[in-house]
Amino acid sequence: MHMSDALLNPVVGGAMLAVSAGAIALSVRKISKEQLDEGKLPMMAVSGAFVFAAQMINFTIPGTGSSGHIGGGALLAALLGPFPALITIAAVLLIQALCFADGGLIAYGCNVFNMGVIPCLIVWPVMRRVFQKDGWSVGRLRASGALTAFAGLELGAFCVVLQTMLSGITLLPFKPFTALMLPIHAAIGLGESLVTAAVLSYVYRARPEWFADRTAGASTRSLKPVLVTLLIATVAVGGLLSLYASAYPDGLEWSIARVSDEEPEASAPSFNVAATIQETTAFMPDYGFANGADESAALGTSVSGILGAAMTALLAGGAGAAAYLTKKKRKSA
Amino acid sequence: MQEKIRSIATLEDIANGDSALHRMHPGAKLICLAVLLSTTISFPRTSVSAPLAYLSFISVSFALADIPLALACKRLIVALPFAAFGGISNLIFDRAPSFWIGRIVITNGALSCASLILRALLCVSYVVILMAVTPLSRLTAQLRRIRVPEIFVRVLEMTYRYIGVLLDEAAGLTASYRLRALTARGVRLEHAGILIGGLFLRTADRAERVHRAMLCRGEGSRAGLPLRQCVRRSDVWAVAIVSASAILFRIINIPEVFAHLADRVM
Protein backbone atom coordinates (compact mmCIF):
# COMPACT_ATOMS: atom_id res chain seq x y z
CA MET A 1 0.00 0.00 0.00
CA HIS A 2 3.08 2.24 -0.12
CA MET A 3 2.39 5.06 -2.58
CA SER A 4 5.15 6.25 -4.88
CA ASP A 5 5.95 9.85 -5.81
CA ALA A 6 5.10 9.42 -9.47
CA LEU A 7 1.42 8.82 -8.70
CA LEU A 8 0.97 12.10 -6.87
CA ASN A 9 0.87 15.72 -7.89
CA PRO A 10 2.70 18.27 -5.71
CA VAL A 11 -0.51 19.75 -4.27
CA VAL A 12 -1.85 16.47 -2.91
CA GLY A 13 1.63 15.33 -1.82
CA GLY A 14 2.33 18.67 -0.08
CA ALA A 15 -1.07 18.80 1.62
CA MET A 16 -0.70 15.26 2.95
CA LEU A 17 2.86 15.98 4.11
CA ALA A 18 1.54 18.92 6.11
CA VAL A 19 -1.30 16.86 7.57
CA SER A 20 1.01 14.04 8.62
CA ALA A 21 3.64 16.46 9.96
CA GLY A 22 0.87 18.01 12.05
CA ALA A 23 -0.16 14.59 13.37
CA ILE A 24 3.47 13.71 14.20
CA ALA A 25 3.99 17.07 15.93
CA LEU A 26 0.85 16.51 17.97
CA SER A 27 2.03 13.03 18.94
CA VAL A 28 5.45 14.37 19.96
CA ARG A 29 3.79 17.00 22.15
CA LYS A 30 1.49 14.44 23.76
CA ILE A 31 4.34 12.03 24.45
CA SER A 32 6.62 14.73 25.83
CA LYS A 33 3.88 16.02 28.10
CA GLU A 34 2.33 12.86 29.44
CA GLN A 35 3.66 9.55 28.38
CA LEU A 36 7.41 9.47 27.88
CA ASP A 37 8.71 7.52 30.82
CA GLU A 38 12.32 6.41 30.98
CA GLY A 39 12.10 3.21 28.99
CA LYS A 40 9.61 4.40 26.39
CA LEU A 41 12.04 5.73 23.83
CA PRO A 42 14.09 2.51 23.40
CA MET A 43 10.83 0.55 23.40
CA MET A 44 9.46 2.69 20.55
CA ALA A 45 12.68 2.38 18.60
CA VAL A 46 13.07 -1.35 19.03
CA SER A 47 9.37 -1.76 18.20
CA GLY A 48 10.06 0.01 14.92
CA ALA A 49 12.73 -2.57 14.16
CA PHE A 50 10.23 -5.23 15.32
CA VAL A 51 7.75 -4.04 12.64
CA PHE A 52 10.46 -4.53 10.00
CA ALA A 53 11.21 -8.00 11.29
CA ALA A 54 7.54 -8.97 11.72
CA GLN A 55 6.86 -7.92 8.13
CA MET A 56 9.42 -10.49 7.04
CA ILE A 57 7.34 -13.29 8.59
CA ASN A 58 4.95 -14.22 5.80
CA PHE A 59 1.91 -16.24 6.78
CA THR A 60 -0.15 -18.28 4.33
CA ILE A 61 -3.71 -17.09 3.71
CA PRO A 62 -5.89 -20.23 3.70
CA GLY A 63 -7.77 -21.02 0.50
CA THR A 64 -5.96 -18.46 -1.64
CA GLY A 65 -2.51 -19.99 -2.04
CA SER A 66 -1.00 -16.58 -1.37
CA SER A 67 0.76 -15.15 1.65
CA GLY A 68 0.67 -11.87 3.54
CA HIS A 69 2.36 -10.03 6.36
CA ILE A 70 1.24 -7.64 9.07
CA GLY A 71 1.29 -3.87 8.53
CA GLY A 72 2.03 -3.11 12.14
CA GLY A 73 0.00 0.08 12.72
CA ALA A 74 -2.85 -1.56 14.62
CA LEU A 75 -0.52 -3.83 16.57
CA LEU A 76 1.74 -0.99 17.68
CA ALA A 77 -1.24 1.21 18.60
CA ALA A 78 -2.46 -1.56 20.92
CA LEU A 79 0.98 -2.35 22.33
CA LEU A 80 2.50 1.13 22.69
CA GLY A 81 -0.48 3.48 22.69
CA PRO A 82 -1.64 5.64 19.76
CA PHE A 83 0.86 8.52 19.87
CA PRO A 84 4.08 6.53 20.36
CA ALA A 85 2.79 4.09 17.73
CA LEU A 86 2.36 6.86 15.18
CA ILE A 87 5.90 8.15 15.72
CA THR A 88 7.29 4.63 15.44
CA ILE A 89 5.36 3.90 12.24
CA ALA A 90 6.42 7.28 10.80
CA ALA A 91 10.08 6.42 11.50
CA VAL A 92 9.66 2.96 9.93
CA LEU A 93 8.05 4.45 6.82
CA LEU A 94 10.84 7.02 6.46
CA ILE A 95 13.50 4.30 6.65
CA GLN A 96 11.55 2.21 4.13
CA ALA A 97 11.35 5.18 1.75
CA LEU A 98 15.01 6.15 2.15
CA CYS A 99 16.72 2.77 2.26
CA PHE A 100 14.42 0.40 0.39
CA ALA A 101 12.53 2.66 -2.08
CA ASP A 102 9.33 1.38 -0.50
CA GLY A 103 7.18 4.50 -0.92
CA GLY A 104 8.36 7.92 -2.04
CA LEU A 105 9.41 11.01 -0.10
CA ILE A 106 6.74 13.32 -1.57
CA ALA A 107 4.31 10.45 -0.93
CA TYR A 108 5.65 10.12 2.63
CA GLY A 109 2.78 12.23 4.00
CA CYS A 110 0.22 10.03 2.26
CA ASN A 111 1.87 6.85 3.53
CA VAL A 112 2.11 8.10 7.12
CA PHE A 113 -1.54 9.12 6.97
CA ASN A 114 -2.79 5.88 5.36
CA MET A 115 -0.73 3.45 7.43
CA GLY A 116 -0.11 5.44 10.61
CA VAL A 117 -2.61 8.18 11.35
CA ILE A 118 -5.65 6.13 10.34
CA PRO A 119 -5.02 2.99 12.43
CA CYS A 120 -3.23 4.70 15.34
CA LEU A 121 -5.03 8.02 15.83
CA ILE A 122 -8.44 7.42 14.27
CA VAL A 123 -9.48 3.75 14.44
CA TRP A 124 -7.68 2.48 17.55
CA PRO A 125 -8.93 5.26 19.92
CA VAL A 126 -12.50 4.54 18.80
CA MET A 127 -12.08 0.78 19.33
CA ARG A 128 -10.43 1.32 22.68
CA ARG A 129 -13.31 3.50 23.81
CA VAL A 130 -15.81 0.84 22.73
CA PHE A 131 -14.03 -2.25 24.10
CA GLN A 132 -12.05 -1.02 27.11
CA LYS A 133 -14.93 0.34 29.16
CA ASP A 134 -14.52 -2.24 31.94
CA GLY A 135 -10.85 -2.99 31.41
CA TRP A 136 -9.19 -5.41 29.04
CA SER A 137 -9.83 -9.11 28.67
CA VAL A 138 -8.40 -11.46 26.06
CA GLY A 139 -11.63 -11.39 24.06
CA ARG A 140 -11.99 -7.61 24.11
CA LEU A 141 -8.36 -7.06 23.22
CA ARG A 142 -8.63 -9.54 20.35
CA ALA A 143 -11.78 -7.90 19.02
CA SER A 144 -10.41 -4.36 19.23
CA GLY A 145 -7.07 -5.34 17.64
CA ALA A 146 -8.71 -7.30 14.83
CA LEU A 147 -11.22 -4.57 14.04
CA THR A 148 -8.52 -1.89 14.11
CA ALA A 149 -6.33 -3.87 11.73
CA PHE A 150 -9.22 -4.55 9.34
CA ALA A 151 -10.84 -1.10 9.42
CA GLY A 152 -7.44 0.62 9.34
CA LEU A 153 -6.38 -1.27 6.22
CA GLU A 154 -9.68 -0.72 4.41
CA LEU A 155 -9.76 3.01 5.25
CA GLY A 156 -6.10 3.30 4.25
CA ALA A 157 -6.81 1.61 0.90
CA PHE A 158 -9.75 3.93 0.35
CA CYS A 159 -7.51 6.92 1.07
CA VAL A 160 -5.01 5.62 -1.51
CA VAL A 161 -7.85 5.69 -4.04
CA LEU A 162 -8.85 9.23 -3.04
CA GLN A 163 -5.28 10.56 -3.10
CA THR A 164 -4.61 8.97 -6.49
CA MET A 165 -7.87 10.33 -7.89
CA LEU A 166 -7.21 13.84 -6.55
CA SER A 167 -3.74 13.79 -8.10
CA GLY A 168 -5.22 13.01 -11.52
CA ILE A 169 -2.19 11.03 -12.66
CA THR A 170 -4.05 7.81 -13.41
CA LEU A 171 -7.29 7.65 -15.34
CA LEU A 172 -8.79 4.73 -13.43
CA PRO A 173 -12.44 5.62 -12.84
CA PHE A 174 -13.34 6.01 -9.16
CA LYS A 175 -15.83 3.14 -8.93
CA PRO A 176 -13.75 0.37 -10.58
CA PHE A 177 -10.61 1.53 -8.71
CA THR A 178 -12.44 1.40 -5.39
CA ALA A 179 -14.07 -1.91 -6.34
CA LEU A 180 -10.59 -3.29 -7.06
CA MET A 181 -8.73 -1.91 -4.05
CA LEU A 182 -11.22 -2.58 -1.25
CA PRO A 183 -11.89 -6.31 -1.83
CA ILE A 184 -8.14 -7.02 -2.29
CA HIS A 185 -7.35 -5.23 0.95
CA ALA A 186 -10.33 -6.86 2.65
CA ALA A 187 -8.73 -10.27 2.02
CA ILE A 188 -5.34 -9.04 3.25
CA GLY A 189 -7.02 -7.24 6.16
CA LEU A 190 -8.79 -10.41 7.22
CA GLY A 191 -5.47 -12.23 7.49
CA GLU A 192 -3.83 -9.30 9.26
CA SER A 193 -6.71 -8.90 11.71
CA LEU A 194 -6.53 -12.60 12.67
CA VAL A 195 -2.77 -12.41 13.22
CA THR A 196 -3.04 -9.10 15.13
CA ALA A 197 -5.68 -10.62 17.41
CA ALA A 198 -3.52 -13.70 17.97
CA VAL A 199 -0.40 -11.63 18.76
CA LEU A 200 -2.31 -9.42 21.21
CA SER A 201 -3.84 -12.37 23.01
CA TYR A 202 -0.41 -14.07 23.22
CA VAL A 203 1.25 -10.95 24.63
CA TYR A 204 -1.68 -10.33 27.01
CA ARG A 205 -1.44 -13.86 28.40
CA ALA A 206 2.34 -13.62 28.77
CA ARG A 207 2.49 -10.05 30.15
CA PRO A 208 -0.92 -8.81 31.33
CA GLU A 209 0.74 -5.98 33.29
CA TRP A 210 1.90 -4.54 29.98
CA PHE A 211 -1.65 -3.54 29.01
CA ALA A 212 -2.50 -2.17 32.45
CA ASP A 213 0.50 0.20 32.14
CA ARG A 214 -0.12 1.18 28.54
CA THR A 215 -3.74 2.17 28.92
CA ALA A 216 -3.93 3.67 32.38
CA GLY A 217 -5.64 7.04 32.25
CA ALA A 218 -5.65 7.13 28.49
CA SER A 219 -9.19 6.29 27.54
CA THR A 220 -10.84 9.63 28.13
CA ARG A 221 -8.65 11.67 25.79
CA SER A 222 -10.62 13.72 23.29
CA LEU A 223 -10.08 13.19 19.57
CA LYS A 224 -11.20 16.70 18.67
CA PRO A 225 -7.75 18.36 18.67
CA VAL A 226 -6.38 15.71 16.31
CA LEU A 227 -9.23 16.00 13.86
CA VAL A 228 -9.32 19.82 13.96
CA THR A 229 -5.53 20.06 13.41
CA LEU A 230 -5.71 17.68 10.46
CA LEU A 231 -8.63 19.56 8.93
CA ILE A 232 -6.99 22.99 9.26
CA ALA A 233 -3.68 21.72 7.86
CA THR A 234 -5.43 20.12 4.87
CA VAL A 235 -7.47 23.18 4.00
CA ALA A 236 -4.60 25.63 4.52
CA VAL A 237 -1.91 23.76 2.62
CA GLY A 238 -4.23 22.39 -0.07
CA GLY A 239 -5.63 25.88 -0.65
CA LEU A 240 -2.24 27.61 -0.68
CA LEU A 241 -0.46 25.10 -2.87
CA SER A 242 -3.31 24.88 -5.36
CA LEU A 243 -2.71 28.56 -6.21
CA TYR A 244 0.63 27.52 -7.64
CA ALA A 245 -0.62 24.43 -9.44
CA SER A 246 0.53 24.58 -13.02
CA ALA A 247 -1.59 23.71 -16.01
CA TYR A 248 1.41 24.08 -18.34
CA PRO A 249 1.37 21.24 -20.85
CA ASP A 250 4.33 19.29 -22.12
CA GLY A 251 6.18 20.34 -25.24
CA LEU A 252 5.58 16.98 -26.88
CA GLU A 253 1.86 17.48 -26.23
CA TRP A 254 2.12 20.85 -27.97
CA SER A 255 3.80 19.40 -31.00
CA ILE A 256 1.14 16.68 -31.14
CA ALA A 257 -1.58 19.30 -30.91
CA ARG A 258 0.00 21.10 -33.83
CA VAL A 259 -0.15 17.92 -35.85
CA SER A 260 -3.81 17.33 -35.08
CA ASP A 261 -4.78 21.04 -35.22
CA GLU A 262 -6.00 20.93 -31.66
CA GLU A 263 -4.67 23.09 -28.88
CA PRO A 264 -4.87 21.58 -25.41
CA GLU A 265 -6.98 23.73 -23.15
CA ALA A 266 -5.05 25.58 -20.49
CA SER A 267 -5.87 28.94 -19.05
CA ALA A 268 -3.88 29.27 -15.82
CA PRO A 269 -1.63 32.38 -15.57
CA SER A 270 1.40 30.11 -15.13
CA PHE A 271 0.56 28.55 -18.50
CA ASN A 272 0.74 31.93 -20.26
CA VAL A 273 4.05 32.78 -18.61
CA ALA A 274 5.49 29.38 -19.52
CA ALA A 275 4.13 29.67 -23.06
CA THR A 276 5.81 33.06 -23.52
CA ILE A 277 9.14 31.69 -22.24
CA GLN A 278 8.86 28.65 -24.46
CA GLU A 279 8.01 30.71 -27.55
CA THR A 280 10.91 33.06 -26.85
CA THR A 281 13.39 30.25 -26.41
CA ALA A 282 12.21 28.16 -29.41
CA PHE A 283 14.49 28.39 -32.45
CA MET A 284 11.66 27.85 -34.93
CA PRO A 285 8.11 28.29 -33.61
CA ASP A 286 6.41 26.26 -36.36
CA TYR A 287 8.78 23.48 -37.16
CA GLY A 288 8.47 20.49 -39.45
CA PHE A 289 9.99 19.23 -42.67
CA ALA A 290 10.67 22.19 -44.95
CA ASN A 291 9.18 20.82 -48.13
CA GLY A 292 6.62 18.23 -47.10
CA ALA A 293 2.88 17.97 -47.55
CA ASP A 294 0.57 17.74 -44.51
CA GLU A 295 1.12 14.04 -43.89
CA SER A 296 4.87 14.16 -44.16
CA ALA A 297 4.86 17.31 -42.02
CA ALA A 298 3.00 15.37 -39.36
CA LEU A 299 5.44 12.50 -39.57
CA GLY A 300 8.32 14.94 -39.60
CA THR A 301 7.12 16.62 -36.43
CA SER A 302 6.73 13.26 -34.69
CA VAL A 303 10.13 12.08 -35.88
CA SER A 304 11.90 15.27 -34.86
CA GLY A 305 10.14 15.15 -31.48
CA ILE A 306 11.38 11.61 -30.92
CA LEU A 307 14.82 12.54 -32.22
CA GLY A 308 14.91 15.46 -29.76
CA ALA A 309 13.98 13.15 -26.90
CA ALA A 310 16.63 10.63 -27.95
CA MET A 311 19.26 13.36 -28.18
CA THR A 312 18.36 14.58 -24.69
CA ALA A 313 18.63 11.08 -23.25
CA LEU A 314 21.98 10.59 -25.02
CA LEU A 315 23.29 13.91 -23.77
CA ALA A 316 22.11 13.10 -20.23
CA GLY A 317 24.06 9.84 -20.38
CA GLY A 318 26.98 11.66 -22.04
CA ALA A 319 27.12 14.15 -19.16
CA GLY A 320 27.57 11.23 -16.79
CA ALA A 321 30.26 9.67 -18.97
CA ALA A 322 32.08 13.01 -19.18
CA ALA A 323 31.93 13.41 -15.40
CA TYR A 324 33.28 9.88 -14.96
CA LEU A 325 36.13 10.37 -17.43
CA THR A 326 37.12 13.72 -15.90
CA LYS A 327 37.18 12.14 -12.46
CA LYS A 328 39.28 9.23 -13.73
CA LYS A 329 41.71 11.60 -15.44
CA ARG A 330 42.14 13.64 -12.27
CA LYS A 331 42.75 10.51 -10.22
CA SER A 332 45.42 9.20 -12.58
CA ALA A 333 47.14 12.62 -12.83
CA MET B 1 15.84 -11.57 5.61
CA GLN B 2 19.56 -12.03 5.07
CA GLU B 3 19.11 -10.18 1.78
CA LYS B 4 17.57 -7.21 3.63
CA ILE B 5 20.42 -7.15 6.16
CA ARG B 6 22.99 -7.29 3.35
CA SER B 7 21.17 -4.51 1.53
CA ILE B 8 21.45 -2.19 4.56
CA ALA B 9 25.13 -3.05 5.02
CA THR B 10 25.90 -2.39 1.33
CA LEU B 11 24.15 0.96 1.43
CA GLU B 12 26.11 1.96 4.54
CA ASP B 13 29.42 0.95 2.93
CA ILE B 14 28.73 3.02 -0.17
CA ALA B 15 27.47 5.98 1.88
CA ASN B 16 30.76 6.10 3.79
CA GLY B 17 32.75 6.57 0.58
CA ASP B 18 34.65 9.67 -0.50
CA SER B 19 33.63 11.79 -3.47
CA ALA B 20 32.51 15.34 -4.18
CA LEU B 21 28.92 14.28 -3.53
CA HIS B 22 29.84 12.48 -0.31
CA ARG B 23 31.60 15.61 0.96
CA MET B 24 28.63 17.88 0.17
CA HIS B 25 26.69 19.30 3.12
CA PRO B 26 23.63 17.10 3.90
CA GLY B 27 21.40 20.19 4.06
CA ALA B 28 22.47 21.13 0.54
CA LYS B 29 21.70 17.59 -0.63
CA LEU B 30 18.25 17.72 0.95
CA ILE B 31 17.46 21.05 -0.76
CA CYS B 32 18.59 19.63 -4.13
CA LEU B 33 16.48 16.52 -3.54
CA ALA B 34 13.39 18.60 -2.69
CA VAL B 35 13.79 20.73 -5.82
CA LEU B 36 14.36 17.72 -8.06
CA LEU B 37 11.44 15.74 -6.64
CA SER B 38 8.95 18.60 -6.77
CA THR B 39 9.89 19.67 -10.31
CA THR B 40 9.86 16.07 -11.57
CA ILE B 41 6.40 15.26 -10.28
CA SER B 42 4.97 18.60 -11.44
CA PHE B 43 5.13 17.61 -15.12
CA PRO B 44 1.77 17.04 -16.81
CA ARG B 45 0.46 13.50 -17.06
CA THR B 46 1.54 12.85 -20.65
CA SER B 47 5.00 14.45 -20.51
CA VAL B 48 7.51 11.93 -21.74
CA SER B 49 10.17 13.94 -23.50
CA ALA B 50 10.69 16.88 -21.12
CA PRO B 51 11.54 14.84 -17.97
CA LEU B 52 14.27 13.03 -19.94
CA ALA B 53 16.56 16.00 -19.31
CA TYR B 54 16.55 15.08 -15.61
CA LEU B 55 18.43 11.87 -16.45
CA SER B 56 21.54 14.06 -16.62
CA PHE B 57 21.42 14.63 -12.83
CA ILE B 58 21.30 10.89 -12.30
CA SER B 59 24.07 9.96 -14.73
CA VAL B 60 26.40 12.67 -13.40
CA SER B 61 25.73 11.68 -9.77
CA PHE B 62 26.28 7.98 -10.47
CA ALA B 63 29.53 8.78 -12.24
CA LEU B 64 30.82 11.19 -9.59
CA ALA B 65 29.97 9.03 -6.60
CA ASP B 66 30.74 5.58 -8.09
CA ILE B 67 27.28 4.28 -7.21
CA PRO B 68 26.73 0.71 -8.44
CA LEU B 69 23.88 0.46 -10.95
CA ALA B 70 22.69 -2.78 -9.33
CA LEU B 71 21.82 -0.84 -6.17
CA ALA B 72 19.46 1.45 -8.08
CA CYS B 73 18.01 -1.43 -10.11
CA LYS B 74 17.06 -3.38 -6.97
CA ARG B 75 15.25 -0.35 -5.53
CA LEU B 76 13.50 0.26 -8.85
CA ILE B 77 12.11 -3.27 -8.85
CA VAL B 78 10.44 -2.49 -5.52
CA ALA B 79 9.07 0.87 -6.61
CA LEU B 80 7.95 0.18 -10.17
CA PRO B 81 4.99 -2.23 -9.78
CA PHE B 82 2.67 0.38 -8.23
CA ALA B 83 3.63 3.01 -10.81
CA ALA B 84 3.30 0.43 -13.59
CA PHE B 85 -0.19 -0.45 -12.33
CA GLY B 86 -1.21 3.20 -12.63
CA GLY B 87 0.46 3.45 -16.03
CA ILE B 88 -1.17 0.33 -17.44
CA SER B 89 -4.58 1.53 -16.27
CA ASN B 90 -4.01 4.72 -18.29
CA LEU B 91 -3.07 2.57 -21.25
CA ILE B 92 -6.45 0.84 -20.99
CA PHE B 93 -8.66 3.80 -20.17
CA ASP B 94 -7.17 6.48 -22.42
CA ARG B 95 -7.13 5.19 -25.97
CA ALA B 96 -7.45 8.54 -27.71
CA PRO B 97 -4.85 8.70 -30.47
CA SER B 98 -2.15 11.22 -29.79
CA PHE B 99 0.09 10.95 -32.83
CA TRP B 100 1.30 8.47 -35.42
CA ILE B 101 4.74 7.15 -36.18
CA GLY B 102 4.20 5.83 -39.66
CA ARG B 103 1.21 3.54 -39.18
CA ILE B 104 1.71 3.01 -35.48
CA VAL B 105 -0.78 4.91 -33.33
CA ILE B 106 0.57 6.30 -30.09
CA THR B 107 -2.30 6.87 -27.66
CA ASN B 108 -2.48 9.37 -24.81
CA GLY B 109 -2.58 6.37 -22.47
CA ALA B 110 0.71 5.05 -23.85
CA LEU B 111 2.31 8.45 -23.33
CA SER B 112 1.06 8.77 -19.76
CA CYS B 113 2.11 5.19 -18.98
CA ALA B 114 5.63 5.90 -20.23
CA SER B 115 5.68 9.22 -18.37
CA LEU B 116 4.61 7.61 -15.09
CA ILE B 117 7.27 4.92 -15.29
CA LEU B 118 9.94 7.46 -16.27
CA ARG B 119 9.04 9.77 -13.39
CA ALA B 120 8.95 6.86 -10.93
CA LEU B 121 12.42 5.86 -12.14
CA LEU B 122 13.70 9.41 -11.68
CA CYS B 123 12.20 9.87 -8.19
CA VAL B 124 13.54 6.55 -6.91
CA SER B 125 16.97 7.27 -8.38
CA TYR B 126 17.20 10.65 -6.61
CA VAL B 127 16.56 8.99 -3.25
CA VAL B 128 18.99 6.14 -4.01
CA ILE B 129 21.67 8.74 -4.83
CA LEU B 130 20.98 10.67 -1.62
CA MET B 131 21.28 7.57 0.52
CA ALA B 132 24.32 6.30 -1.38
CA VAL B 133 26.28 9.49 -0.66
CA THR B 134 24.98 10.34 2.83
CA PRO B 135 25.26 8.17 5.94
CA LEU B 136 22.04 8.19 7.97
CA SER B 137 23.87 9.77 10.94
CA ARG B 138 24.58 12.89 8.83
CA LEU B 139 20.97 13.07 7.65
CA THR B 140 19.63 12.82 11.19
CA ALA B 141 22.13 15.48 12.34
CA GLN B 142 20.69 17.72 9.64
CA LEU B 143 17.14 16.89 10.76
CA ARG B 144 18.14 18.05 14.27
CA ARG B 145 19.55 21.28 12.86
CA ILE B 146 16.25 22.05 11.13
CA ARG B 147 14.44 21.44 14.43
CA VAL B 148 12.72 18.14 13.67
CA PRO B 149 11.54 16.90 17.10
CA GLU B 150 14.27 15.07 19.00
CA ILE B 151 11.99 12.13 19.87
CA PHE B 152 11.28 11.45 16.22
CA VAL B 153 14.94 11.70 15.21
CA ARG B 154 16.07 9.39 17.99
CA VAL B 155 13.40 6.82 17.23
CA LEU B 156 14.50 6.98 13.59
CA GLU B 157 18.18 6.47 14.46
CA MET B 158 17.57 3.67 16.93
CA THR B 159 15.08 1.87 14.72
CA TYR B 160 17.64 1.89 11.91
CA ARG B 161 20.34 0.64 14.26
CA TYR B 162 18.25 -2.28 15.53
CA ILE B 163 16.74 -3.46 12.24
CA GLY B 164 19.63 -5.88 11.71
CA VAL B 165 19.35 -7.24 15.26
CA LEU B 166 15.60 -7.83 15.05
CA LEU B 167 15.85 -9.29 11.55
CA ASP B 168 18.35 -11.78 12.95
CA GLU B 169 15.89 -12.68 15.72
CA ALA B 170 13.08 -13.12 13.20
CA ALA B 171 15.34 -15.21 10.94
CA GLY B 172 16.15 -17.47 13.90
CA LEU B 173 12.47 -17.88 14.77
CA THR B 174 11.36 -18.70 11.24
CA ALA B 175 14.30 -21.08 10.71
CA SER B 176 13.31 -22.99 13.86
CA TYR B 177 9.70 -23.07 12.67
CA ARG B 178 10.68 -24.39 9.23
CA LEU B 179 12.81 -27.13 10.79
CA ARG B 180 9.86 -28.29 12.87
CA ALA B 181 7.22 -27.96 10.13
CA LEU B 182 8.97 -29.40 7.11
CA THR B 183 5.88 -29.47 4.92
CA ALA B 184 4.76 -25.89 5.55
CA ARG B 185 5.66 -23.44 2.74
CA GLY B 186 5.17 -20.37 4.90
CA VAL B 187 4.14 -19.82 8.49
CA ARG B 188 0.60 -21.12 9.01
CA LEU B 189 -1.93 -18.48 9.99
CA GLU B 190 -2.72 -20.12 13.35
CA HIS B 191 1.00 -20.13 14.25
CA ALA B 192 1.81 -16.61 13.05
CA GLY B 193 0.34 -15.01 16.20
CA ILE B 194 2.55 -17.00 18.55
CA LEU B 195 5.62 -16.45 16.39
CA ILE B 196 5.15 -12.69 16.04
CA GLY B 197 4.02 -12.40 19.67
CA GLY B 198 7.19 -14.22 20.73
CA LEU B 199 9.23 -11.86 18.61
CA PHE B 200 7.56 -8.90 20.30
CA LEU B 201 8.37 -10.22 23.78
CA ARG B 202 11.99 -10.68 22.75
CA THR B 203 11.83 -7.12 21.38
CA ALA B 204 10.57 -5.78 24.71
CA ASP B 205 13.35 -7.55 26.59
CA ARG B 206 15.89 -6.23 24.11
CA ALA B 207 14.52 -2.69 24.58
CA GLU B 208 14.97 -2.99 28.33
CA ARG B 209 18.60 -4.04 27.88
CA VAL B 210 19.12 -1.21 25.39
CA HIS B 211 17.68 1.25 27.88
CA ARG B 212 19.98 0.04 30.65
CA ALA B 213 22.97 0.25 28.32
CA MET B 214 21.97 3.79 27.35
CA LEU B 215 21.77 4.79 31.01
CA CYS B 216 25.23 3.30 31.61
CA ARG B 217 26.61 5.50 28.83
CA GLY B 218 25.26 8.64 30.49
CA GLU B 219 21.94 8.92 28.64
CA GLY B 220 19.75 11.69 30.01
CA SER B 221 22.60 13.77 31.38
CA ARG B 222 22.99 15.67 28.12
CA ALA B 223 21.29 15.86 24.77
CA GLY B 224 22.89 14.03 21.85
CA LEU B 225 25.44 16.29 20.16
CA PRO B 226 24.70 16.76 16.46
CA LEU B 227 27.54 16.13 14.02
CA ARG B 228 29.01 19.45 12.90
CA GLN B 229 29.64 20.21 9.27
CA CYS B 230 30.23 23.68 7.87
CA VAL B 231 28.48 24.95 4.77
CA ARG B 232 31.17 25.59 2.15
CA ARG B 233 31.05 27.79 -0.90
CA SER B 234 30.93 24.69 -3.13
CA ASP B 235 27.73 23.56 -1.36
CA VAL B 236 26.03 26.86 -2.16
CA TRP B 237 27.16 26.59 -5.77
CA ALA B 238 25.93 23.01 -6.01
CA VAL B 239 22.48 23.97 -4.72
CA ALA B 240 22.32 26.96 -7.06
CA ILE B 241 23.37 24.96 -10.13
CA VAL B 242 21.11 21.97 -9.45
CA SER B 243 18.09 24.13 -8.58
CA ALA B 244 18.56 26.48 -11.52
CA SER B 245 18.99 23.66 -14.01
CA ALA B 246 16.04 21.69 -12.56
CA ILE B 247 13.79 24.74 -12.88
CA LEU B 248 15.18 25.48 -16.35
CA PHE B 249 14.49 21.90 -17.49
CA ARG B 250 10.98 22.26 -16.11
CA ILE B 251 10.26 25.52 -17.94
CA ILE B 252 12.13 24.88 -21.20
CA ASN B 253 11.46 21.64 -23.00
CA ILE B 254 15.03 20.60 -23.86
CA PRO B 255 14.03 17.74 -26.23
CA GLU B 256 11.87 20.24 -28.12
CA VAL B 257 14.87 22.51 -28.54
CA PHE B 258 16.81 19.54 -29.95
CA ALA B 259 13.83 18.71 -32.17
CA HIS B 260 14.04 22.21 -33.67
CA LEU B 261 17.74 21.73 -34.22
CA ALA B 262 17.13 18.36 -35.88
CA ASP B 263 14.52 19.98 -38.10
CA ARG B 264 16.98 22.61 -39.18
CA VAL B 265 19.57 20.02 -40.04
CA MET B 266 17.05 17.88 -41.94
Image (tube, coloured by chain):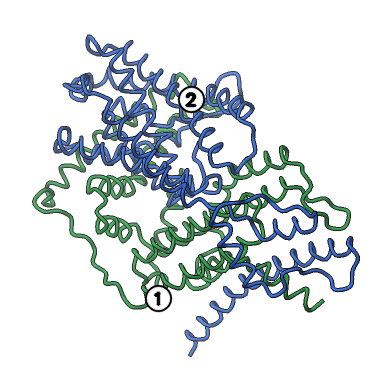
Task: Name the colour assigned to chain A in the rendering.
Answer: blue
Marks 2 & 1 on one chain = no
Percent x, y of residue B210: 21, 43
Q: Residue at x 12, y 46 (%)?
A: B215
Q: Residue at x 40, y 36 (%)?
A: A113
Looking at the image, can residue B3 be seen? no
Q: Residue at x 76, y 59 (%)?
A: A258
Q: What element carries label 1?
A: helix
Task: Name the colour assigned to chain B in the rendering.
Answer: green
Chain ID, mark 2: A
Percent x, y of residue A159: 48, 32
Q: Name the residue under label 1.
A: B237
Check the image and report above or below for B173 versus B224: above
Q: Residue at x 58, y 75 (%)?
A: A319
Going by the image, does A254 lie left or right of A290? left
Report the front residue among B107 and A142: B107
Farthest-out residue, right: A293
Report the front residue among B149 and B39: B39
Report the front residue among A26 and B123: A26
Q: Is mark 2 on a helix, strand or loop?
A: helix
The amino acid type found where label 1 is placed reads Trp
Going by the image, does A254 lie left or right of A187? right
Mark 2–mark 1 contact, CB under 8 Å? no
Looking at the image, can residue B228 be seen? yes
The amino acid type found where label 2 is placed reads Glu
Q: Name the residue under label 2.
A: A154
Report the front residue among A32 and B208: A32
Percent x, y of residue A293: 91, 65
Check the image and report above or below for A82 versus A134: below
